[in-house]
């Protein structure tokens, strides 16, 4: 119950925080605060209002946005794992997000090397096929 409520609140706040009107409202608050400075003599209290407000909002937003990103990342990972599972991909890639950064980097390097080898092999096959087609076309032309 609490988890679902928190998830709904986190999603709503994250969505609203990314909207242009929210940014405009925040800019308006800062402008109003700055313009009000002379009326308050640029006092310590005047500065404390903006500092405290922005600190509290930032503190809360970090946790809400992190929660949303964690869920989004886990959902994307689950979708990718399912695509790997049902495709010709290698199942040993499922769950690699739990490895250390250096272990993931090692796997990524291996994948990049394999992709380059595969691209090179495909290029060679294409070249051989093109040469064979030219020979076949010449033979047909001479026949």
Image (cartoon, rainbow, N blue to C red):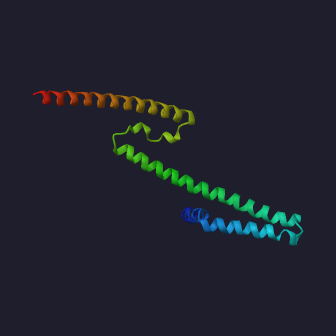
Q: Residue at x 32, y 27 (%)?
A: 124
Residue 120 is situated, as x and y percent measured from the top left of the image, at 37, 29
Above or below, comparing residue 78 to residue 108 in the picture: below
Q: Nearest the camera: 101 or 114?
A: 114
Picture quarter with the N terminus: bottom right
Q: Quadrant of residue 44?
A: bottom right
Q: Is residue 57 left or right of residue 140?
A: right
Residue 104 is situated, as x and y percent measured from the top left of the image, at 52, 36
Q: Residue at x 70, y 66 (%)?
A: 27
Q: Quadrant of residue 64?
A: bottom right
Q: Is residue 107 left or right of residue 91?
A: right
Q: Residue at x 68, y 60 (%)?
A: 60
Above or below, comparing residue 125 to residue 67 in the picture: above
Picture quarter with the C terminus: top left
Residue 122 is situated, as x and y percent measured from the top left of the image, at 33, 31
Q: Nearest the camera: 142 or 30?
A: 142
Q: Is residue 39 left or right of residue 96?
A: right
């Amino acid at each position: 119950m609490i988890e679902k409520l928190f998830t709904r609140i986190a999603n709503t706040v994250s969505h609203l925080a990314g909207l242009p009107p929210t940014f405009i409202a925040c800019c308006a608050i800062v402008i109003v605060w700055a313009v009000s400075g002379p009326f308050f003599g640029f006092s310590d209290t005047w500065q404390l209002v903006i500092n405290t407000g922005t600190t509290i909002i930032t503190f809360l937003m970090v946790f809400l946005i992190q929660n949303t990103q964690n869920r989004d990342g886990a959902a994307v990972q689950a979708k990718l794992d399912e695509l790997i599972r049902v495709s010709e991909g290698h199942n040993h890639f499922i769950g690699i997000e739990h490895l250390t950064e250096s272990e993931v980097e090692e796997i990524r390097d291996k994948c990049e090397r394999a992709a380059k080898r595969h691209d090179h092999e495909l290029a060679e096959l294409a070249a051989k096929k093109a040469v064979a087609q030219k020979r076949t076309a010449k033979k047909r032309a001479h026949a």
